[in-house]
């Protein structure tokens, strides 16, 4: 049978708690599949850094790169911890992986599952996907400061947008849109202020769009997009946007569609030259860590994205169905469940519904 080498980075805070449940589900769903997952656990994150001083060594990166895919929980310490200066974990680990492994598509679906309460009340059908650029924009680390610590300090953070980088993610977004029933793509940017990167994104969307006459394209400034995400989320099908706008919009998207505990994501290298990485959108949640309070659903749905990416569509669909059923059942009871109880309930549904 086929063997998949999976690198597992449980990380910090609630990361190990939610990854444990995701792995339970992975094991249960693949029992009936002709595939074996061969797991390697990597101890990485703020905890490892505080113990050893290592963030991500060249050896770690080489070893991870030799895997077929990556499952990540969350990394990062308590925001503001003085021992973790200069975003060393976020930049040196998470973004280093995304950039080194050329994860130029950061795929973040948002679906309001049946029965899930939304802070919007009854917003109607919410089912859209954000295609967030993953390797450029203000995230590249092209910045610097002079006269630091003085009243004359100047700090720059340059957003890098290349025609190559924009084109490949825009093309991917058109493919996603073409394969969805509504076939609608919204470019989100801030072209009224960010004129150089804005006109590059607009030109490329127009050029690539000419090859996709079946996809309806529109445009929103990012500030207006936040209005419509709250007042009329049903208007969205596929959103394509830059790295920073995509980061902000997807926390908002998670909030309106049942909460951050449900939001899954894939950092994809569509060329297949490097392993893609699947992770919940949320972080290490130090405020609730270690108490079995975290919702592992986002991590479990990230396993569904992983399975899809590996071509195991049936297994992915079974995970989604089991999660959907669990979510429906949740809304009819008030009792909050421990992290592991949610994983167990989803595993039970999987084993009760044979492939
Ligand atoms: P966060 O997502 O960790 O937490 C924000 C809020 O959401 C908190 O109140 C938290 O309790 C809650 N929350 C998050 N996940 C939850 C879950 N599964 N179930 C229930 N509640 C959940 O964001 P933050 O507080 O801004 O960041 C904490 C740390 O995580 C920081 O170090 C940050 O840099 C890092 N971070 C890492 C990733 C990642 O690894 N991909 C993503 C975001 C933030
Ligand atoms: C996310 C996170 C990361 C990001 C941080 C932790 C670097 O917020 O995955 O959304 O900004 O991409
Ligand atoms: Mn984020």
Image: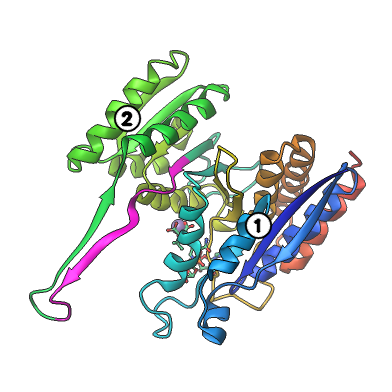
Task: Residue 90 in the image: state x and y as whole percent.
Answer: 45, 67
Task: Residue 200 in the image: state x and y as whole percent.
Answer: 26, 33
Say the numbered circle drawn on residue 71: 1
Give the Cα separation between the discs numbered 1 and 2.
33 Å
* Residue lying at 73% horizontally and 64% vertically, measured from the top left: 40
Q: Quadrant of the N terminus?
A: top right
Q: Nearer the viewer, residue 33 or 1?
A: 1
Indicate the secondary structure of the residue bearing disc 2.
Answer: strand
The answer to if 143 sits in the magenta stretch is: yes
Q: Is residue 125 visible?
A: yes
**Where 210 falls versus 150 (above or below)?**
above
Mark 2, residues whose alpha carbon is within 10 Å: few (<14), some, or many (≥20)?
Answer: some
Work out whether mark 1 precedes mark 2 in sequence or the reverse, and give the earlier one.
1
Q: Main secondary structure of the magenta part?
A: strand
Q: Nearer the viewer, residue 160 or 307?
A: 160
Camera-near label (1 vs 2) is 1
Q: Nearer the viewer, residue 260 or 299?
A: 299
| Quadrant in the rendering for residue 181 | top right
* Residue lying at 45% horizontally and 68% vertically, measured from the top left: 92
| Quadrant in the rendering for residue 91 | bottom left
The answer to if 316 sits in the magenta stretch is: no
Q: Quadrant of the C terminus?
A: top right
Please say which color scheme the image uses.
rainbow
**For the residue with label 1, is its CB less than 8 Å from the closest atom of ligand 1?**
no
Task: Identify the residue at the far left of this view.
Answer: 152
| Left or right of residue 234: residue 305 | right
Tell how many labels: 2
| Quadrant in the rendering for residue 270 | top right
Say the numbered circle drawn on residue 219: 2
* Residue lying at 55% horizontally and 73% vertically, measured from the top left: 45
Q: Which residues are magenta?
A: 131-149
């Amino acid at each position: 049978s086929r063997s998949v080498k999976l690198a597992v980075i449980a990380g910090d805070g609630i990361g190990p708690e939610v990854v444990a449940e995701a792995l339970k589900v992975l094991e249960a769903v693949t029992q009936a599949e002709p595939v074996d997952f061969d797991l390697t656990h990597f101890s990485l994150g703020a905890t490892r850094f505080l113990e050893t001083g290592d963030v991500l060594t060249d050896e770690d990166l080489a070893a991870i790169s030799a895997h077929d895919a990556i499952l990540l929980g969350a990394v990062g310490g308590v925001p503001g911890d003085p021992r973790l200066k200069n975003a060393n974990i976020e930049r040196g680990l998470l973004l280093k992986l995304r950039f080194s492994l050329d994860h130029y598509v950061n795929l973040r679906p948002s679906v309001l599952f049946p029965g899930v309460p939304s802070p919007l009340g009854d917003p109607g059908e919410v089912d859209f996907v954000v295609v967030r650029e993953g390797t450029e924009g203000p995230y590249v680390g092209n910045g610097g400061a002079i006269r630091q610590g003085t009243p004359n300090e100047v700090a720059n953070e340059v957003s890098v947008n290349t025609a190559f980088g924009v084109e490949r993610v825009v093309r991917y977004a058109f493919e996603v849109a073409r394969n969805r029933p509504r076939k609608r793509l919204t470019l989100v940017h801030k072209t009224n202020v960010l004129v150089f990167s804005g006109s590059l994104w607009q030109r490329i969307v127009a050029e690539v769009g000419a090859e996709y006459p079946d996809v309806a394209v529109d445009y929103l400034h990012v500030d207006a997009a936040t209005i419509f995400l709250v007042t009329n989320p049903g208007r969205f099908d596929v959103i394509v946007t830059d790295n920073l706008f995509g980061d902000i919009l997807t926390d908002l998207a998670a909030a309106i569609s049942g909460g951050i505990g449900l939001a899954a994501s894939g950092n994809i290298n569509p060329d297949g030259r490097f392993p893609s990485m699947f992770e919940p959108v949320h972080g290490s949640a130090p405020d609730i860590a270690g108490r079995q309070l975290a919702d592992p659903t986002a991590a479990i749905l990230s396993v569904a994205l992983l399975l899809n990416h590996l071509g195991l569509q049936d297994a992915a669909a079974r995970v989604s169905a089991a999660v959907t059923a669990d979510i429906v059942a949740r809304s009819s009871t008030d009792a909050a469940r421990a992290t592991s109880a949610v994983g167990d309930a989803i595993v039970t549904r999987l084993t009760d519904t044979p492939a």
